[in-house]
Amino acid sequence: MKKITAEPYRIKVVEPIKMSTREEREQWIRDAGYNVFGLKAEQVYIDLLTDSGTSAMSDNQWAGLMLGDESYAGCRNFYNLEATVQDIFGFKYVLPTHQGRGAENIMTQIFIKPGTYVLGNMHFDSTRGHIKLKGGIPVDLVIDEGLDPQSQHPFKGNINVEKMESFIKEHGPDKISFVLITVTCNNNGGQPVSMVNIKSTCEVASKYNIPVMFDAARFAENCYFIRTREKGYENKSIKEIAREMFSYGDGCVMSSKKDGLVNIGGLFCTKHKEIYEQAIQLSIVYEGFPTYGGQAGRDMEALSRGLQEVIQEPYLADRIGQVQYLGQKLKDRNVPIVEPVGGHGVYVDAKRFLPNIPQSQFPGQAIVVALYINSGVRCVELGTSAFAEKDEKTGEMIYPDLELVRLAIPRRVYTNRHMDVVAEGLADIYDRRHELKGFKIVYEAPVLRHFTARFEPLK
Ligand code: P71
């Protein structure tokens, strides 16, 4: 029998959160145009909007803040961070950035020539934005199983390597600026990429002289899945797995707001001196002098310590275990979710949850609003509101394959009793799903509309 375990930490500081009444929440969400991005955080009881920048830091990280060296150039915390990243990632050259997208800006400026393609499993929104702004064309090549919420494939973030090679042959290697592997793959459920897949992706890319970068936002969670799901890695440490994974690529960008266990910051790393030298120029213009890159000395100290904590096996077992706990509770109540459950949250399959509400009426948004009103839980729609696009030629709406609602779980912040409240609330709504109505959009911005859109419920 499996031994019962509990959190590998105890709680030293608590932050009160406010409970509210259903009537208050009905009023607040109406005022916010039925968009949870418009709510004040204090109007939320359990906030599962994102796992980005929402982690709780450890006592060791907080202690590190006091050791911040706020010198403009060459502060000691940079050298600590550099040594930690070199040790865990294996990349020689390390540049801090203000957050993930700062590193993406540097990466896309270095690699992209206008009119070239950037291949990847699934590019994240901000990456996609940076690629397009530099004249590149983002191409998603995730395996078919990755787009099927019910497929039990253990590595649904994998790249379809054959498809990638045919794409390169068809368009010519000169037309591909670089390959980006996002670990774990956020857009389809925090799904991992296997070591075998990373290795063969990099082999094919290098055959055609195409550089490979990683989006390492959730690298430790990916390594944990490799350790627990991929043959040959069960006895390796997370650090050994990370070192092997990164060894196949040319560098990485990272939003340290996820697996850095800090609230802000990012990294750009590479093994090549020439790339580093170009990156320094861009860093000075967009981020800051290369030994701070938009971060305070104390931020870099907390990040250095966070990276050492995030690769600890008990931490990851607890972290991934909590996400699976919520997933299992929802499954027990028949709520349709993306399976297997990924690394940083549970993704609800809105198409199966509300088969009677067409994508044009925002079924995901209907679930998000109902869960907020019911339980004070804030989550996010990753479906029609976030990703539908108008066809430039025909003006027709193109709906995304996946209509999902993400319950992202902040790291070390909530207990499993909070997860029980979330599961209970969502299961209640599922039992009453026939009462739910769709929405129409009454205001939308031309780009990234889901942050500021306003909705009205359909009668
Ligand atoms: C998430 C976020 C935060 C977010 C950012 C933009 C729009 C909506 C939500 C951010 C990521 C990410 C990956 C794989 C790069 C970034 C940008 N994720 N890559 O999931 O997931 O990092 O926010 O530090 O600039 O809620 P940044």
Image (cartoon, grey):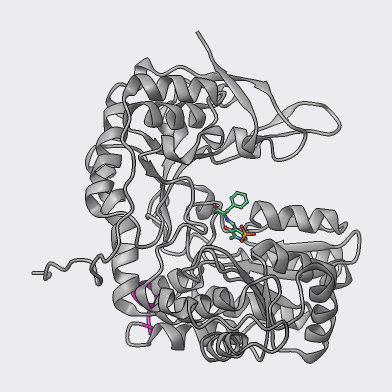
Against 204, is 389 above or below? above
**Is residue 282 left or right of 445 when viewed as pictured?**
right
Residue 118 percent location from the top left of the image? 76, 63
Q: Give the number of callouts.
A: 0
Residue 208 percent location from the top left of the image? 79, 79
* Residue span colored magenta: 227-233
**Is residue 313 left or right of 216 when viewed as pictured?**
left
**Is residue 261 left or right of 107 when viewed as pictured?**
left
- The verdict on residue 317 being magenta is no
Q: Residue at x 47, y 32 (%)?
A: 351
Q: Residue at x 25, y 71 (%)?
A: 9
Residue 260 percent location from the top left of the image? 50, 71
Which one is nearer the viewer's eye here, 445 or 134? 445
Against 377, is 161 above or below? below
Q: Residue at x 79, y 74 (%)?
A: 283
Quarter of the image where one finds residue 83 = bottom right
Against 194, is 375 above or below? above
Quarter of the image where one finds residue 99 = bottom right
Quarter occupied by the N terminus: bottom left
Which one is nearer the viewer's eye here, 26 or 141? 26
Residue 102 percent location from the top left of the image? 72, 65
Which one is nearer the viewer's eye here, 63 or 448? 63
Quarter of the image where one finds residue 18 = top left
**Residue sitting farthest toward the left:** 1
**Residue sitting farthest toward the right:** 114
The quarter of the picture showing ligand 1:
bottom right
**Is residue 161 left or right of 65 when viewed as pictured?**
right
